[in-house]
Image: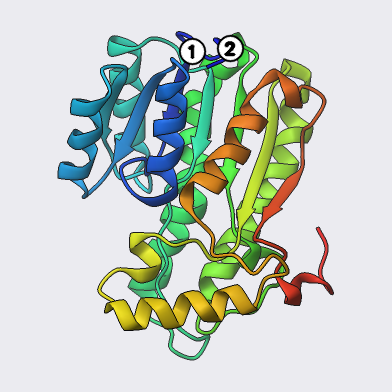
Amino acid sequence: MTGEFDDKVILVTGGSRGIGRAIAIKFAEEGAKVAVNYNKSVEKAYELKEKYPNIEVFKADVSIRDEVREMIKGIHDKLGAIDILVNNAGILDFRSFEDYDDKAVRYMMDVNLYGVIYTTLEALDDLKRNRGVIINIASNAGIGTAFERTTYYAVSKAGVIMLTKRLAYELGKYGIRVNAVAPGWVETDMTIGGKTLDEIKTIEETMKDKTMLNMVGKPEYIADVVLFLASEKSRFITGQIIVADGGRVDNLTHSV
């Protein structure tokens, strides 16, 4: 506990599960006032609220700007102006390019990319006033890492990466730092949900073999990177994409 985040207001979208949940917990344990956004995972969101008195939960589908606007108003009423925004909400719908479904693909784009746009727009006045920090959760898929049936997901995350760079350029004059974390495969409900123990073990071994560190990604590993990017230790870093994937071997030919 450094005290750096005491009483800072942090918004984590998609904060009730997976990587977002780990991020919310890290900030809560550092003394921040954490707004956890959720859409469908009501029980998991309220589990966090019950465990951490400095966490408040707010329902909104980030793909709908009116809902985001109402969420921000609620955060103002309960916690105050936002200091740090973590755009984490995202969905993964496995499908190849030819397996196109208009409704499914558009919704994934709406959540993964427009959710970042809408939330940032609605929080921007706060962030300008507080010389805030924006951290977007992208993916190494967005820089070219090959995964089966993730073409549209990769495109949405590539959009987040470019948006991060452009926001850093446009918002730097306000003292706002904007960076992104691009995780590799991380063990979450989204990646192993519904799998048997044997299936999970097989997936873990496969993913270990694909990394230089021979490790499986955990949500807390990504949360630690986010905490660094939110802190004064990264005061001279903006417009960067931090790839946190254990050293994916097939990333050797790609760069950001």
As drawn, 58 above or below 20:
above
Q: Is residue 31 left or right of residue 54?
A: right
* Mark 1 Cα shell of 10 Å, populated few (<14), some (14-19), many (≥20): many
Q: Amino acid at mark 1?
A: Lys
Horizontal and vertical percent position of residue 32: 44, 17
As drawn, 200 above or below 30:
below
Q: CA distance from mark 2 to mark 1?
A: 8 Å
Q: Is residue 67 left or right of residue 191?
A: left
At mark 1, the secondary structure is loop
- The residue where tag 2 is placed is 4
Q: Which mark is residue 61?
A: none
Residue 170's image quarter? top right
- The residue where tag 1 is placed is 8
Horizontal and vertical percent position of residue 239: 77, 39
Residue at 68 percent across and 73 percent down: it is: 145
The reply to whether the C-beta atoms of the residues labelled 2 and 1 are less than 8 Å apart is yes
Disc 2 versus disc 1: nearer the observer: 2
Residue at 43 percent across and 15 percent down: it is: 31
Q: Which of these two is toward me, 211 or 162?
A: 211
Q: Amino acid at mark 2?
A: Glu
